Amino acid sequence: MKDSSLLKENHVHVNELIWKNRKKPIKEIRATLKKVGIDLTENIIRNRKNRMLKAGKVVAPLPPVTERTLDDHIEDKKSRLSAKKEKKALSEALERIEMLETEREAILAIKEDVKTFKIIPAEHRGKSEATALWLASDWHVGERVNRGQVNDINEYNPTISKKRGENFFKNGLKLTDMAAREVHVDTIVLALLGDFITGHLHLDAVENNYLAPVEETVYAQEIIISGINFILENSKYNLIIPCHSGNHGRTTKFSHFGSENGHSLEYFMYRSIANYYRNEKRVKVLIAEGAHSYLDVYGYRIRFLHGHDVKFNGGSGGITIPLNKAISQWDKAMPAYLTCLGHFHQRFDGNSFLVNGSLIGYNSFALSIKASAEKPAQQFALIDRDRGKTIVCPIIVE
């Protein structure tokens, strides 16, 4: 444009001249515009002409295109990003306000419109019936456990074993009495599942044990009989006592599966206990002749064993995998509702089985089989006449 003072490029008069000369070629239109001091490119003239031909009349020209710098584009980008962030922040704020309003309405509704209904106590048409199940095993009453052997977690000796044995009977009776407040409990099944002594099964026990095998057996028997007498003197419960020998009580180097009891000090201890209560009508001692024994409680068959015939080498899944496999095989010969065992020093409820803890607590054996460093405890369970196994909890011994 040569002389913008004569006629502004964006003045509508420019388009009027293009419109009047629309039938002429673009070059002639450009020459006509130049005569009045307007120098537009052919492309601009063509675009304006086409816009007006499309509209069928004179239209105002588009705003002129101005040159923009890189800084202008950067500022526009920043402005757009800022606007986007502000829009997002506003949206989030609105959502938060809506949520708070909803919470406020809910709080007001809870506060101002409280509705309740009356719970009617259950009719006592006679208490249901249950049997208490106590698992006792892995006491190792003569073994020595120095704190330094197990990272200062535990200590054990005959004095401690006696105290924990007393607590087993006291707290087992407390749990049974608690259950008897709501259900009729007539019988305690006190399952003696072996390893009450450590014996000399391993060479280190010869050096470390406080008591020799026979002395240890006598000591374990004293604690057990004293505990049974405590139950008889402080309750009216009957006692059924399934007995199983552990692997530590044997006098042979290896297990003699066909004649295990004949080489077990614990087996003779059980015979002695049975003889001690031969005239006590409330006590029935059941000494297993084989690796397993069975007891029917309200039609629920319970299997008892010590557990040393279940092989476990610290694999993934713990004792549950080998034990479930073993139970599956045992059930083919004699199905059982519940399997109870000791040996592993781990108190565990596997639904179809109960593994007992230990009285001795964490020791070198537990360390060797990668057992958890759990507190010494024994297993308590309640077998309900109508529901089977219900309550399972520890009998605390320290």
Image: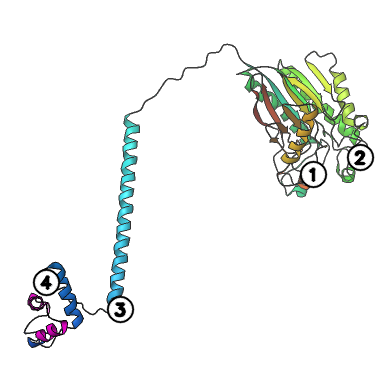
Up the image or down, 102 lies above or below 291; here it is below
The answer, for residue 228, to whether it is visible in the render is no
Disc 3 from disc 1: Cα separation: 78 Å
Q: In which quadrant of the rendered view does residue 235 lie?
A: top right
Disc 2 from disc 3: Cα separation: 91 Å
Label 3, on which residue?
70
What's the residue type where badge 3 is placed?
Leu
Q: Nearer the viewer, mark 1 or mark 4?
A: 4
Residue at 87% of width from left, 46% of height from top?
204
Q: Nearer the viewer, mark 2 or mark 1?
A: 2
Q: Closer to the N terminus: mark 1 or mark 4? A: 4
Mark identifier at residue 321: none
Q: Nearer the viewer, mark 3 or mark 1?
A: 3
Label 1, on which residue?
365
Q: Nearer the viewer, mark 3 or mark 4?
A: 4
Q: Closer to the N terminus: mark 3 or mark 1? A: 3
* The residue stretch that appears in magenta: 9-33
Q: Secondary structure at mark 2?
A: loop
Image position, residue 239 (x, y; %): 76, 19
Up the image or down, 91 lies above or below 35; here it is above
Image position, residue 197 (x, y; %): 84, 35
Q: In which quadrant of the rendered view does residue 343 lie?
A: top right
Image position, residue 319 (x, y; %): 74, 41
Q: Closer to the N terminus: mark 2 or mark 1? A: 2
Disc 2 from disc 1: Cα separation: 18 Å
Q: Residues within 10 Å of mark 2 (few under 14, many from 20)?
A: few
Mark identifier at residue 254: 2
